[in-house]
Amino acid sequence: MGPIKSYARKSEDELEVIQQKMMELLDASKINHSDYDGYGRVVVIAPKHGWGPTDDRQKLLQKEILELYTPWIEHLRLLFSGASNEVSRQIKRTDSFMMSWIQKKGGYDVPASIPKAKSLLSKQTQRFDELPQMLESVKRASVIVVPDTNALAVCPDFQTYHKVAGQREFTLVLMPTVLSELDALKVDARKTQEFRGKVKSVIKRIKGLRKQGNLHQGVIINKTITVRMVAREPDFKNSLSWLDRENRDDRILASVLESQRQEPSTVVILSTGDINLQNKAEMAHIPFEEPPDPD
């Protein structure tokens, strides 16, 4: 397994695949030309060029591209939800162009030939290329690890999460949904005494860190690890549309995405052994790792 990429870097890689598929679509396409030269003094305003008929090969490529592009643009908007008006307009304009060309809607932007269409596509998508690259230039913490509740119960030693981070220096973030669930589980009679004991051990560690400093700002342990606590629930208005605020797993994912949005060049890793949460994390483009074995 190679190194885990940041959200911004993954966005660049996915855009490259979309661009390649778009080029394939153009190679399979034809451009028709209007023979109308005008009659007398009558002026007809209409595009000079238009897309030719869409065959089965093109329809298949359109479907493949939409399946890649639709979630990609939602993730890009998420990353830039707090951006300037100019950046927002740039995303909107380029998205409008992309959707028009994927769906072959035609219009005045259809050029005279396929080579010219490829050149125009490259020029338009370059605007998208520049956005993730801009985020990559903003360097902050290199790796953030977000454990879910069961991960902390399996491995309550924060220092051991260097196995998830892949390095000794990282930030471990405790999300509000996880903290709330820990409090509920420590008195849950349906859980075994052993499990409740593990949960209480985690809570004791967290309370112990409060004595060392402000957990909301971050407390350093073992010289290289910063443990930080998030108090605010995630903002679902600036998250992925399919996440449900009433679902515990979705609240964790929304919190991870908010952390990633705030630090787009940082690698944010979810530590969970929950197969359903792993499945959702993959759909949300969030890298995940199994909880580490305790040392």
Image: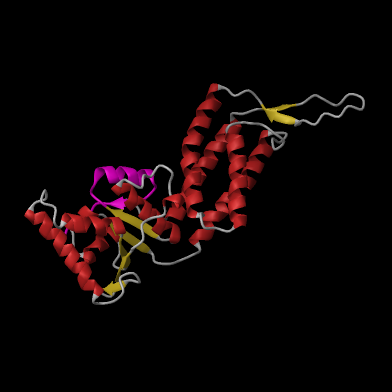
Instruction: Write down the quadrant of residue 261 in the picture.
Output: bottom left
* Residue 231 visible at all: yes
Residue under the point 21% across and 63% down: 160
User: Residue 246's x, y, as percent?
Assistant: 33, 46
Based on the picture, tell me whether residue 212 belongs to the magenta stretch: no
Q: Is residue 102 above or below residue 208?
A: above
Instruction: Judge from the rendering whether residue 120 lies leftward or rightward of residue 145; answer left or right.
Output: right
Q: Is residue 147 above or below residue 248?
A: below
Of residues 20 and 237, which is closer to you in this image?
A: 237
Instruction: Write down the quadrant of residue 197 in the picture.
Output: bottom left
User: Residue 269's x, y, as percent?
Assistant: 33, 56
* Residue 154 visible at all: no
Instruction: Judge from the rendering whether residue 203 lies leftward or rightward of residue 213; answer left or right.
Output: left
- In this view, which residue lies farthest toward the left? 193
Residue under the point 31% across and 42% down: 279
The color scheme shown is secondary structure
Based on the picture, tell me whether residue 276 belongs to the magenta stretch: yes
User: Residue 169's x, y, as percent?
Assistant: 31, 68
Instruction: Write down the quadrant of residue 83 in the picture.
Output: bottom right
Residue under the point 89% across and 24% down: 39
The magenta stretch is: 272-294
Report how many numbered discs are placed on residues in the image. Answer: 0
Instruction: Judge from the rendering whether residue 120 lies leftward or rightward of residue 225; answer left or right.
Output: right
Of residues 237 and 134, which is closer to you in this image?
A: 237
- In this view, which residue lies farthest toward the bottom? 212
User: Residue 49's x, y, as percent?
Assistant: 73, 30
For the C terminus, give its image quadrant.
bottom left
